[in-house]
Image (tube, grey):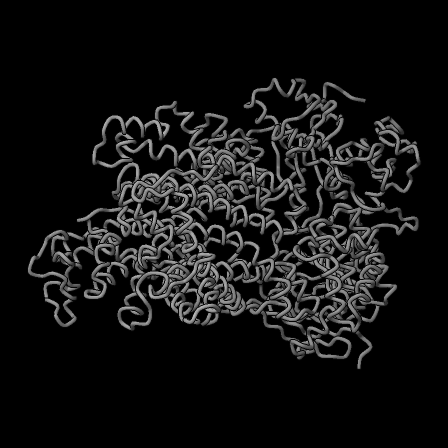
Amino acid sequence: MKFFLKKFLDLIPTLLGISLICFFMIRLIPGDPVLNLVGERGVDPVRYLEMKKALGLDLPIIEQFWHFLKNAFHGNLGTSIVSNNSVWFEFMERFPATIELSLVALFFATLIGIPLGIYAAIKRNSFFDYFLMSSSLIGYSMPIFWWGLILILIFSVKLGLTPVSGRIDLTFDIPLFSGLYLIDTLQSAVLKADGLKPFWSAIKHLILPATALGTIPLAVIARMTRSSMLEVLGEDYIRTARAKGMSKTRIIYIHALRNALVPIVTTLALLFGSIITGAILTETIFSWPGIGKWIVQSITSRDYPVIQGGVLIISFIIIMTNIIVDVIYYFLNPKMRN
Amino acid sequence: MKIFFSELFFELKKNCGAMIGIVFIIFSLFIAFLAPLIAPHNPTEVFADALRLPPSFISGGKAGFFFGTDDIGRDLLSRLIYGSRISLSVGFSVVVISLISGTFLGVVSGYYGGMIDRLIMRLTDLIMSLPSILFAIVIVAVLGPGITNAIVAVSVVAVPNFIRIIRAQVMVEKNRQYVQAAKLFGAGNARIMFIEILPNCMAPLIVQASLGFSDGILNVAALGFLGLGAQAPMSEWGTMLSDARSYIESSPWMVTLPGICILLTVLSFNLLGDGLRDALDPRLKKQN
Amino acid sequence: MRDLSKEILSVDALHKTYDIKKLFRPTLKLKALSDINFHLDKKETLGIVGESGCGKSTLAKVLTKLEPRTLGEINLQGIKYDEISSHDFHSKIQMVFQDPYQSLNPRKKALDIIADPLRINTNTSANETRDLVMAMMKKVGLREEFALRYPHHFSGGQRQRLGIARALMLRPEILILDEPVSALDVSIQAQVLNLLLELQEEFKLSYIFISHDLEVVQHMSDRILVMYLGRVVEYGSRDQIFNNPLHPYTKILLESAPKTHREKSNQAITVKGELPSALNLPKGCAFEPRCPFAKPGCKESIPLLEIKQGREVACFEAH
Amino acid sequence: MSENLLDIKDLNIFFKSDKNPEPIHAVRDLSFSLKQGEMLGVVGESGSGKSITNLALMGILGDGAIVKARECSFNGRELLSLKEREWQKVRGGEIAMIFQDPMTALNPFLTVEFQIVETILAHLNISKSEAKNKAIELLLQVGITSPKDRLKSYPFELSGGMAQRVMIAMAISTGPKLLIADEPTTALDVTIQKQILTLIKSLQEKNNMSVILVTHDLGVVSEFSERVQVMYAGELVETGNTSDLIKNPHHPYTFGLLSSRPGAVERLAKTPLASIAGIVPAFHQRPVGCQFNPRCVHVQEDCKKGSIPIERGVRCLHPMMEALS
């Protein structure tokens, strides 16, 4: 319990810091913030004062920050200049797309990476080990914005197997429940005449971006699993298990694997940050309508409220993920519970 | 120190991957330094009659343009050669900035502990909750896009890695008896931190520096690709990729080549970093 | 018995408490040292024995000012610890550490390891420093050509010699030896012990010799302090402690130590159970829960050191 | 079939290494035997090969090791020709082992119960609940109070002495014929050391179990085992009845080892100790002839060539005759 309290207390300065950065971001932009917000089209003086007041810019700076915090806490992150929608609404509209992409990428990276890493550790210094370690180093070094383009070049342009962009063929009209197309298409398959066709379409659209996004996590997970496993296999208690007459498989799966996976959980938290980075790039390449593409577009269109709100929300999500991972770590490691 | 590096090199020589990495790094340094002599053309020179030519070894290519030309008729090979200058100096700047500040903060944080440590750790938490691209977006939003701002953003994001690694090592080292012995003959805190302890943190620092180099190159290229980093007509590889995107179907070489350059450069630093880790990590040594 | 003119170090009512701070809980007090009193004469060796957790390493740290003390007074040649300048302090009291693999900076050459105390504290010229280092290396039995080597080229015994040389460079009068041979192989231990005896003669050193190895302490010490859980349980001359121990813990300690030559005693006494937590000490005598001779009264209050048969003992039942 | 439980003849252990083309010769021509119910003390400093020998007897040396022997029979079976599956039955079942550092020898992520019960289930044909009851019984037997609570503990919640008791309980849980104790008390305090050694001794007598007690401390051996063998730099240098050997060591190394201990002979305090000059040679710098010859005060020319045979329990051409006094 104390562990969680301490974690929670550590959270406060971080959140405050992020809010400060986002708060000052708009105010540090050279020029008048109101003019920055309305763009360069010019504005009549009455409207200017109205806006200034609406934005709270006439108040002292501390009070402005307080209002900003209060609003942010209530999910009120301002409105987009481009679409006039609330930032929160725009975010929620796009968030499922990013989550679907990231989860699928991470899921496959974990599902493939961990067994590969274990196998390489067991077969240390074998051909397979060398092969896996070299290819994972290449994967780790891969500029994914280029990798995505190469995947498009091969699978879409040359082979014509997959679509170039989007989440699903526009011919399908899918009722949205969760916003995750893989789930929504399955659900609609029961009701609609199209059957599983929309589902396959969603998968076809997803497969390339997920591959591009999953490559680096896959490489990292495979390497981490291998080295963590090797470290554990060198521990004294593995020698004890052998001396007790345990079989090789039992030693690997019961005595070593669990202990080796604990540090990997921590890596997954760090990976989440790089997945967000990756998602921003991947979504740009594949025109995936998620928050990454949304934020990059907002830079081009100088849509400051969107940048501010987007950065705030994404950092918040990353911080929350770290907390969740800490909690998982806490439950995996008996030492922490003591 | 001299012995340290000669032994390190002895260990590295046994590692095939690391040697490949070193050879390629030396090769790219060579190219970067001699770019004006090697490059067949000026990287910004426009050949109006040679738009999007394929490489000379493919049908349709011209002899003067070995890797072909881009959408406004600039020689791709020359642009790639000059691009290595940018990438290597970007990597170098990122490592220098983040290494110096990260090492200092990490040593102080690990050695003193207490409030200073907590303050610095919260700062790293803060930076780590902002992925590099997001941080760059904030900076670009304020200062506008450009290679310098991109380097600043990427360096700041790289600092926590150095802080954490150095801090962890310092916390181990400061409890060793040689530090107590130093205190006993009257060595001051600054001397203990930077003369006694820091040289013993070299191993993880060197590894992280090598990996930081590749991260720096990759991240700045990514920013260039998003239009947040280097701006045209700079021949930065990420920016070149971004320009080439629309021609992926008709002129795939424009996409392929800059990416391969990024991949190879990043890979060679990662190979080196990996080799260094194997050579320096005592735990791995024990298993051998 | 105390001859103040011979005394070089005296420790009065020394306490060391660590505060263990926890969020939303009262701060816990870990009593590492409670009410320690002893003195050290010139050219004498005081042995300090006890098992892990008895506070002997904390005592070494407090005596060398590596850790501040909580209460009590320490006098070095009649001057209070707080009133000695740090320069004077470092040149009067030095320490040899337990682990020869940790106590030498792996990135420094032997020459620099030994020379640094001089370089920091004196204005000795570079040439003179070098000569002094060489002379000291010779004295501790290291060949001159080793001066430019790094610690990992040395064996455990040689490293410990290096550590001794470093400690002696400022010509201290007191040397605190914290388990100086326990990390060494048996055949090497005797070499280092002999060296320490020679050096004590030559430099007129006073030793505080901390060890868990009773045979070694018996061989090296003039007087002995036995510690248990942060308190002194028995304090007397070597012969008093070894030939006629009065405190049950001392008896058991002597009994438990494996010896090659011993008359097999039939009435072997052993302790029950294990060390209690230092955070949760018993109300009475700290040894009571494990003591085979404990009486109900031992639970009630802490026995104080009293002079019995010529030495100090902290036990109600010892006479 | 011999009456000995364990018969080792000319055991040699080599290690392949990256640095040297020649494999390292870690243990040389080691022969010894052990009767059922007997305790054998093995004494040696670091690098003497004593721990490597134990791991070889358990068949758990790493991949780089080559083990050769003329005979290595345990309970009538040749150990070196066992297949992995047969080894697994022997390990933990017939030969059990406890290690130097009990805190790292137990898996930190598994409870005491899990670790003991899995050992029992792997070797004995009983149900899980029976195994649990047996575990409780065993913990009581090794002197752990409130064994039911302890079963739920994780290793880091135990003190060093307690963890070693758990290791012992685990080791004897399958009724092994031989227990190898590799420096079982080096990491522990003297009073706890006494408790643990007494426990091992009583279990040996009660279960008629053979024990190999490895230590660097001749004192430990002299109090607990009838027979002792001294190892130096990969070779057995002297073996015999413990009290005879301690009173009357014939090998100069044993003599040096004994007389360098302050308490070994009556002598005045603060007088110089007899000491052995030099250090144990590193694996790749082993001398020709007697391994001890570079450090020996009685060395003669013939000590520096050929291999020295063991005669009447001593591997020395010029054994010492005078008693230690």
> Which residue is nearer to you in this view: C266 or B156?
B156
Tag count in the figure? 0
Identify the residue at the far bottom of this view. D1
> Which residue appears farthest toward the left when viewing the image?
B49
Q: Is residue D300 visible?
A: no
Residue A188 image position (x, y, % from top left): 46, 65
Location of the N terminus of chain D (image quadrant): bottom right
Residue D64 position, x and y percent, is 56, 69
**Residue at figure coordinates x 64%, y 43% from the top left:** C192
Residue A244 location, x and y as percent?
71, 66
Query: Based on the displayed image, in which of its 4 quarters is residue C202 positioned?
Result: top right
Establish if D153 lies above or below B142. Answer: below
The answer to whether residue A118 is seen in the rendering is: yes
Query: What residue lies at 35% left-to-right and 42% top-to-bottom?
Result: A306
The one of C149 and A178 positioned closer to us in this rendering: A178
At horizontal 71% and vertical 56% (from top left) the residue drawn is D111
Left or right: residue C53 compared with residue A118 = right
